[in-house]
Image: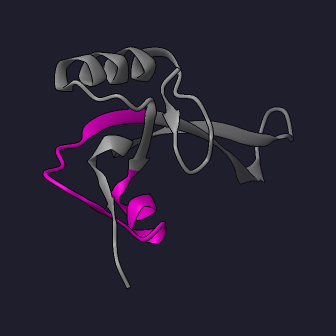
């Protein structure tokens, strides 16, 4: 299962298939992926890194109520991220 190194969450659906394909094509050993910001926060540096796009969908509750039901409206919006395989990381020395 391809997952996020920092959060521990597994990628779902098409993202799982895409990351498995990239892993095989590039010869990566790790099933873990992370964003550039996550790598920097973990004091890691990406070497010769070319990322892979993943798509996430977030659900947000709107503050205003729906005129017909009186309930808060929910909507989703896609968010795109570029993730990098753990094999591309090196530790940054302080």
Return the residue nearer the eye: 78 or 91.
91
Left or right of residue 68, residue 21 in this image: left
Q: Would you say residue 14 sits in the magenta stretch?
A: no
Which residue corresponds to the image point at 26% horizontal and 36% vertical from the top-left? Answer: 52
Q: Looking at the picture, how far across and down is residue 63, in whole percent?
A: 74, 56
If the image is split into quadrants, where does the C terminus sit?
bottom left
Q: Position of residue 89 (x, y in %)?
A: 32, 54
Q: Is residue 30 above or below residue 49?
A: above
**Residue furthest toward the right?**
70
Q: Position of residue 24 (x, y in %)?
A: 26, 17
Residue at 42% across, 71% down = 43
Q: Is residue 85 visible?
A: no
Range covered by the magenta-colored residues:
35-55
Along the line of sight, the residue nearer the viewer: 65 or 11: 11
The colour scheme applied to this rendered structure is: one colour
Residue visible at 40% across and 60% down in the picture? 39
Residue 42 inside the magenta-drawn segment: yes
Question: From this viewpoint, which residue is outermost toward the bottom?
Answer: 94
What is the x, y in percent for residue 79?
43, 43
Q: Residue at x 52, y 40 (%)?
A: 4
Q: Quadrant of residue 70?
A: top right
Q: Residue furthest left?
A: 48
Determine whether 44 is above or below 24 in the image: below
Question: Tag count in the figure?
Answer: 0
């Amino acid at each position: 299962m391809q997952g996020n190194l920092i959060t521990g969450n597994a990628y779902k659906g098409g993202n799982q298939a895409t990351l498995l394909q990239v892993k095989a094509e590039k010869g990566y050993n790790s099933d873990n992926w992370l964003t550039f910001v996550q790598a920097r926060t973990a004091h890691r540096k990406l070497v010769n890194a070319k990322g892979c796009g993943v798509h996430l969908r977030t659900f947000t509750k709107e503050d205003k109520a729906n005129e017909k039901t009186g309930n808060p409206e929910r909507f989703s919006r896609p968010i795109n991220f570029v993730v990098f395989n753990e094999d591309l990381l090196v530790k940054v020395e302080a």
